[in-house]
Amino acid sequence: MTDSIVDAKLELKQASKEFKESENVAEKYSAMTVSKNSDVNMNVGELSAAFTAVPTHKSVKKLQFASQEEKQEFSKFPTKTGRRSLSRSISQSSTDSYSSAASYTDSSDDETSPREKTQVNSKGSSDFCVKNVKQAEFGRREIEIAEQDMSALISLRKRAQGEKPLAGAKVVGCTHITAQTAVLIETLVALGAQCRWAACNIYSTQNEVAAALAETGVAVFAWKGESEDDFWWCIDRCVNTECWQANMILDDGGDLTHWVYKKYPSVFKKVRGIVEESVTGVHRLYQLSKAGKLCVPAMNVNDSVTKQKFDNLYCCRESILDGLKRTTDVMFGGKQVVVCGYGEVGKGCCTALKALGAIVCVTEIDPICALQACMDGFKVVKLNEVVRQVDMVITCTGNKNVVTREQLDRMKNGCIVCNMGHSNTEIDVASLRTPELTWERVRSQVDHVIWPDGKRVILLAEGRLLNLSCSTVPSFVLSITATTQALALIELYNAPDGRYRQDVYLLPKKMDEYVASLHLPNFDAHLTELSDEQAKYMGLNKNGPFKPNYYR
């Protein structure tokens, strides 16, 4: 009998033995699967024994190679341990390289303030202050990704690039510094403007994007996690510089405008206009105008239809959930939520939360908005009436002290408190910085404020804007706002003397409609055209505007 036949018989015998053992295990396991009326007597020890009775695999014979070349070729592939280590490495780099706001951070630089470092870009310029200019390549990829969903702004850039409508414009800006804002800034530069930029929020800056802007020559002063002193220092560096004086202001929140009025009022002698995009900033501009202190024309972008309907409503409808999920991993179904304010931002937040099963109440001061909330199926309440039982409080007003210390004291353990309005004054965070309360940072932008009795309130982004501090917002929506801002700057900068007085103006309706039309090709949308008879009947120009200036 040959060796091969003997080996075959031995293998057959071994296989038969293993089959019988597996049958025994199956019988033992099936004994545990009893009917509902049977008693289950098997304990944990027996359960463990049943599974450990499964026969282990025999050791694999050592591989034989026909030649040394085959052995070398095989050695090129990673071993099981090697593959596991590689997988673990990739997993760690994925979590370490991206913060909650999809921002790359170099941990080795985290402890050093950018103000203490001397950095130079590849062109030899040091007129900037960012976390780490070496992150520019990564930031450039972020900007390129954003450009793909901001086709309307890119289209405007291409159409107007030859004319250079902003040639000679010196724009000082204070906005969120994200990949989407970078597309706007680079559009302004392509249209002929010189730009200096600071961040309007100490938590929303994407460090790698700021680095990419600095690398291209934009004087940007911003990094994620600035202190209050850093915040004002960055704004000052943008405004107070030799051989450069701004003649246009692009603001988000009014802090830049406030700083110029306070420290450098002479700058307004050359400024042709201010473009403001937030509720808070617009409110400040109207206050200045009413007091007779507004010395240049200002464009209210926040109340343009494209900003209100798309950025405030549709953007917040998506980004509120993104910000809450990234920071708290909360389950929305069945949660009791109160949303303070039912403007466009509040409407977006309420719609999103309701869709995921949350029980939503609304607080309002405006009877019209309150009636809208009622008609949309939301109960309108006072915060004091529900503050003890709600699981989440979200502010969307742009006002101050919407949530007070007294109300924070009455909240239940584990209540989540956050802000979706621009200003960080809506939640009285300052009142929580007292000796009897303990602050515990549990993750990026998430603090547990602990009361003496052990109660914890979960505060997000220290009361600052949630979606841009703790997550990101859709590039497409920001394309709409950015295009509106660019057109407002072009309009104010090129307007003949006398067209705009020292007052606050809304964006002309024709421009609003033009911004919307630039974005329609993304949906392959085809507009119906009025006939001459129809246009005459409605009293409209066939090419618009189709709505009066007061339409919102």
Image (tube, rainbow, N blue to C red):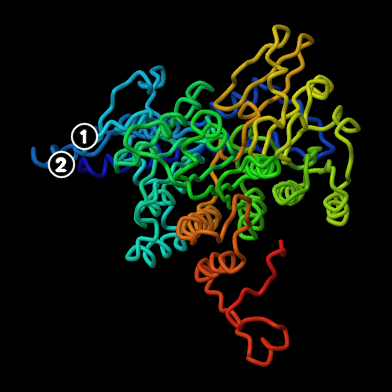
Q: Name which of mark 2 and mark 1 comes first in the sequence.
A: 2
Q: Secondary structure at mark 1?
A: loop
Residue 378 shown left or right of residue 231 in the figure: right
Q: From this viewpoint, which residue is outermost toward the top?
A: 435
Q: Can residue 282 be seen?
A: yes
Residue 25: name its quadrant: top right
Residue 535: percent from the left, percent from the top? 67, 86
Tell me how many marks there are.
2
Q: Which mark is residue 124?
A: 1
Q: Amino acid at mark 1?
A: Gly
Which residue shows up at 87% across the image and 57% down it?
Answer: 375
Which residue shows up at 41% across the image and 48% down it?
Answer: 185
Q: Residues within 10 Å of mark 1 (few under 14, many from 20)?
A: few
Identify the residue under disc 2.
73
Residue 241: percent from the left, percent from the top? 36, 32
Residue toward you, 37 or 478: 478
Residue 473 shown left or right of residue 47 in the figure: left
Residue 12 drawn above or below residue 458: below
Q: From this viewpoint, which residue is outermost toward the right?
A: 385
Residue 364: percent from the left, percent from the top? 83, 43
Q: Can residue 361 be seen?
A: no
Q: From this viewpoint, which residue is outermost toward the bottom?
A: 533
Q: Amino acid at mark 2?
A: Glu
Q: From this viewpoint, which residue is outermost toward the left?
A: 68
Which residue shows up at 41% across the image and 60% down it?
Answer: 154
